Amino acid sequence: MPPDADHPEQIYVTTPIYYVNDRPHIGHIYTTTVCDVFARYHRFSGRDVFFLTGTDEHAAKVVDAAAERGLTPQQWADRNAGEFRDTFQRLRLSHDDFIRTSETRHIQRVQQYVKALLESGDVYLGDYEGWYDAGQEEYVPENKAKQYEFKSPINGKPLVRKTEKNYFFKLSAYREQLLALLESSETVDGCTFDVRPAARRNEVIQRIKDAEDVPISRTGSTGWGIPVPGDEAHTIYVWIDALFNYLTTVDIDDRRKYWKSGPVHVIAKDILWFHAAIWPAVLLALRKCNGYEWVNLPKLVYSHSFWISEGQKMSKSLGNFIDLEKIDEYVERYSLDALRFFLSAEGPLGPTDSDFSAAQFHECYNTNLVNTLGNCASRVAAMIGKYFDGKVPDPGNSKRELDGYVWPQTTGDIVSSCCAAYDAFDLYNAIDGAIGLIRIVDGFINATEPFKLAKDESKRDELSLILYQCAEALRIASLLLWPVCPDKIAELWRAYSLDINPAAGTLHELAQWGGLKPGTAIKKIALFPRLDAPERSTAAAT
Ligand code: ME8
């Protein structure tokens, strides 16, 4: 549904907040990029978007990494948070805020929430003994620890038996409510909640059935972390502190509307349990507290899979790690928009991992960007240049059918299905629809052969109609591709003299057939240069 301009719908989309023990890598850039595509699509559609990313700083691994370098955790966090911020800016990601969990605005609110939960009894003091995964900073349930032979399912290091006096969150009290929410798409206690893809939702459902209360504090604090209000000997567990970022950032007057619209949390499968079980339960508990009745649940937790690299899990020792230097090489060689396109079109949005390989990147670039988008844009511009002096011809009735092509209907159907795919965070089908439209234009050119008609003066009207229809369909496809390739599409718009400002939120109006005015000047354009295939399988540029 096209949005209502007078009452724009709010869209709140978040990435995970990233650990600052190290610099950003392709995984962080991937999640932030797909959220950026989603945010740009919604802004262009006239919605009121708030896009949040940031850094998670109170982890023990930050303390360790800082100590190795003789720095304080704050110094190391500052340095790496700066790297994340600079990288995201360089990659022109369009987040509206960047939250750091060491900021006062976050710390104060987390303490308020925990205080409210202590008062309501959903957080209580107790004893905990269990198998602790130090790398992940989480306890592993007994049955899972056994299944993995008491080693970390993530990094294979031995789990440690640990006993602690801890504050606990009463997760077990929310099992039924969570199951009801996850097993139906219906409203429970005024809330809806969904986890996608469905395979991930099912995993969570299985695990919730025997969920126990979870410890949410640590003792023996290093002074790095948020103290439990009223009991400074305990520090709030980094995961609870981190999850709250989604709420702390918008828990101010003019931003609460974003929370109320139901956030969309985009994460990877590694942190599914925290987002799809613990977080909604904490929110259900908070909403029972005085003054927090407005706190509803996320609309969606979207859990994508992992990038692997050159067919194997990414690792620094294997030399297949896609770090910032490698990412910069790809951007330099292929363009930032090519990276965005590859990540969005071939990334692990579904339930299986995707392979980041130099050969696959190159293939995707050639097929979609050089041979389809770039080629069609330059082909249409060249013909209009040659046969109509670089001015869009007057088609007469631009809806007239030629060779069975019913253009307004074709573009109308594609715009609807493509927007429905964007709305559903289904970037594969959104991109497939837009690129598919360009392929239809190519097929139309091949079927109607305007280059032959141009030789016959009596076919001038037909030629005008064909080239108008090509340019118009391409214009509509460009609108659909803008969220993915904003720079290159802006370049296309400049060459086609189209004055489009995506911030005006007019995607749906602009996507109507007939928007292109006859007489519009069109210049020659070469969007994506043809490049040699990479020589080595692990390098982007040699
Ligand atoms: O888990 N493929 O932070 P983190 C795709 N601070 N995405 C990947 C990836 C890969 N190979 N590797 C990482 C944390 N990611 C916590 C989150 S949120 C309240 C706290 C992405 O720095 C993916 O989004 O380990 C994953 O969930 C996230 O980075 C983990 O980032």
Image (tube, rainbow, N blue to C red):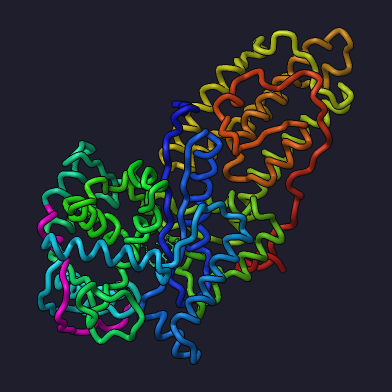
Q: Residue 496: x and y, percent?
A: 76, 32
Judged left or right of residue 347, residue 194 is left
Which quadrant of the structure image shows residue 486? top right
Magenta residue span: 156-175
Judged left or right of residue 445, residue 244 is left
Which quadrant of the structure image shows residue 258? top left
In the foreground, 241 or 195: 241
User: In the image, is residue 161 part of the stretch drawn in magenta?
Assistant: yes
Q: Residue 534: x and y, percent?
A: 69, 62
Q: Residue at x 83, y 36 (%)?
A: 524
From the viewer's perspective, is residue 468 above or below residue 217? above
> Which image quadrant: the N terminus?
top left
Q: Residue at x 40, y 57 (%)?
A: 249
Q: Residue at x 65, y 36 (%)?
A: 501
User: In the image, is residue 93 part of the stretch drawn in magenta?
Assistant: no
Q: Quadrant of ligand 1?
A: bottom left
Q: Residue 105: x and y, percent?
A: 40, 64
Q: Residue at x 59, y 52 (%)?
A: 340
In the foreground, 401 or 18: 18
Judged left or right of residue 207, residue 459 is right
From the viewer's perspective, is residue 350 above or below residue 419? below
Confirm whether residue 347 shows in the render. yes
> Which image quadrant: the C terminus?
bottom right
In the foreground, 235 or 324: 235
